[in-house]
Image (cartoon, rainbow, N blue to C red):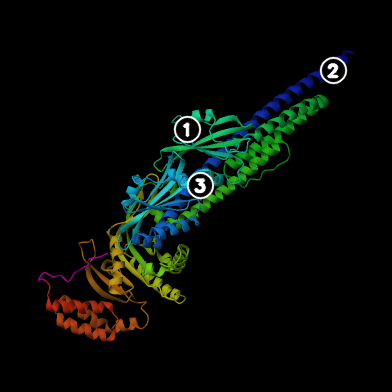
Amino acid sequence: MIRLSIGFKIIGLNIFIALAVAFIVTLVSIRQITQQINERLLQTGENLVQNIQERIRNDVEQTQRFAELLSDNQELHQFLKKRDTNGLQEWLNNQSEIEIYALLEVFDSQSQRLVTNRWLNKKPEEIEPYLTEPEDSSLAKAQDYLITVELKALPAGMILKTTVPIVDWETIDILGLLVVSFPMNQNWIDRVRGRSSQDLTIATKTSPHIATTIVTPKGKRMEKLPERIKGLLTHNTTPAPIKQLTLFNQSYTVLFSPIYDLRSIPQGHLIIWLKRDLIEATTQQILSVLLFVAIASVIGCVIFGAYLSQNLTRPLRNLVHTVKLIASGNLKQKIKITSDDEIGDLAAAVSSMQNDLQIGHALVHQMLKTFQLFVPSQFLKYIAHDGIENVQLGNAQQEMASVLFLDIRAFTSRTEKMTPQKVLDFLNHLFHSISAPIEQQGFIDKFIGDAIMAIFEEEMDSENRCQGAVPSLNAALGILEALHQFNESQDIPVQVGIGINTGAIIFGTMGSASRMDSTVLGNTVNVASRVESLTKQYGVHLLVTDSTQQALPVNHSFLMREVDLVRVMGKKEAVTVYEVFNQDIGGLKEKKLKIQSEYHHALQLYHARQWEDSLACLRSCQETLPEDQVIQIYIERCQTYLTSPPADDWDGVYTMQTK
């Protein structure tokens, strides 16, 4: 009896210990798992907030690109020039088919609204709250050739608005103003949510209206925020997350994220409603496991209790070890799911998180590659010494470089009957054909409508001379050769003008705290642009300045002839421009070589004020090359100076009166 009693006590003690251990282990497991699931849920919400904020930034950029593309449309320009409001209205309604969610407004040059588009078939009184007032500051900025992008709260709700000037770039006159608006209303938030199971709400302090995906039990959208939420939004600070809130018989964890305008001023709040179904269901499952463990511990006594404890903690230790490896950067670490209980669910959740991290890492890598399509890697070494994440407004560095400008001739007349998409396809096809010669030795800084600006970096040789002029000329000749091949498939050949200048330029960033762009500045850039425009006046394809010509080695193989000593528009100093004619076709190159000596002699006589002798040489050259526009220009000047000689202090400089 004594042994039996002691045995029962030992068994009872073991059972008690086993139950206590099982109970404690289960409670700890519940707490750890619940905490980790809560953290996972909050992380999911934060990721969703980041995705939506990124969507807003993308919408800002897409809205600006869409607005700029519309503002450059030649049909729009013609309607404004003719004051054809009927045609303008029909054209604007057609743009609604391209972007059905956009509200489009066109103002005249005096900021008076002309027309709006047929926006989502809304009635005029429904559109009225979203319209731009004539005294809006964005219209005033557009009058100064500035593009504004605003994200602001209206009484009708949040709206994303882009205002751009409609400019006739030939006369630099403002024809009107274009406003493109995307209300962040019910349609927008439904598109943002997509297939996500989480609910979203956008609320502002100034508007009683909210946009939300929450549906009431009656099947209608929630019209007002709960008083608890509304009270939190009255403060100026961002509310802390609400761990648990019951709404319409659904339990939520609620996150708040301010929505800033482009001046970093909060305009409203994005509210994320995270459903807590997983946490509550998991908690119920764990409580059931607790009862099972208690009964099993009594039946299996100490051995089963110890066995159960061991099997509960081992997967958790393995999972924690695996999570630490993932946290250290080992995203390829495999996670073994050895059970189908809560720990297995947690392992599956961690595995899902790992997959998301891998996708995010790949997305960041792809975004970096895409970023280099907009900002060349050669540019980044000047403005991002410490990586693109550290780029700041005002970063700048001065360097020597050759700047190339290219412009398509008669582009407006060529494309005025094309649709915007056909214009874009034509430009992309052409730029793809002629970009390779540039990218082999330099880089394209930007595409400016129908023009290209390219940079060729300079290095100084032992004689302190620039060494980037040769690549720039090679690229220009390569462009003309590629253009010849491109024109073989064109009914009307494409003609271009190219200007090159060499000197000091500034690589830098400019803009505002919320939007900046990379750019190059300096007198070298401005002169290169002016020289490109001179190609039209002289009827040639490629002109370079004397600074570029002097940077060439003595034994270069470029065929060049002096064209003129000019003072370009807006500049005091004169520059000598030279034509490079290696790629002239149809016998022009051979004819220019044949008369080159006599041509240069005619220019010497011209600058020596010997007009008659120069005129005789020029007419002799014209017999060989009657189509040469440069020779004709000098003939006309000589004829003028014979009857009306210039002043005694004439220096041979021809001052340009236009750009």
Q: Main secondary structure of the magenta part?
A: loop
Alpha carbons under labels 1 and 2: distance apart: 62 Å
Which three-letter amino acid code belongs to the residue tagged 1?
Thr
Closer to us: 655 or 135:
135
Q: Which residue is mark 1?
A: 238
Side (left or right) of 634 relative to 271: left
Magenta residues span 647-659
Judge depth for marks 3 and 2 and give the one in front. 3
- The residue under the point 71% across, 27% down is 26
Tell me whether circle 1 and circle 3 mark residues in contact (CB < 8 Å): no
Q: Is residue 86 visible?
A: yes
Which residue is at the far right? 1
Nearest to N terminus: mark 3 or mark 2: 2
The location of residue 149, given as percent across then percent down, is 40, 47
Which three-letter amino acid code belongs to the residue tagged 2?
Phe
The location of residue 68, given as percent across then percent down, is 41, 56
Closer to us: 421 or 43:
421
Which three-letter amino acid code belongs to the residue tagged 3?
Arg
The location of residue 54, given as percent across then percent down, is 50, 46
Q: Is residue 302 visible?
A: no
Quarter of the C terminus within the rendering: bottom left
Residue 108 in which image quadrant: bottom left
Helix, strand, or loop for circle 3? helix
- The residue under the point 39% across, 41% down is 263
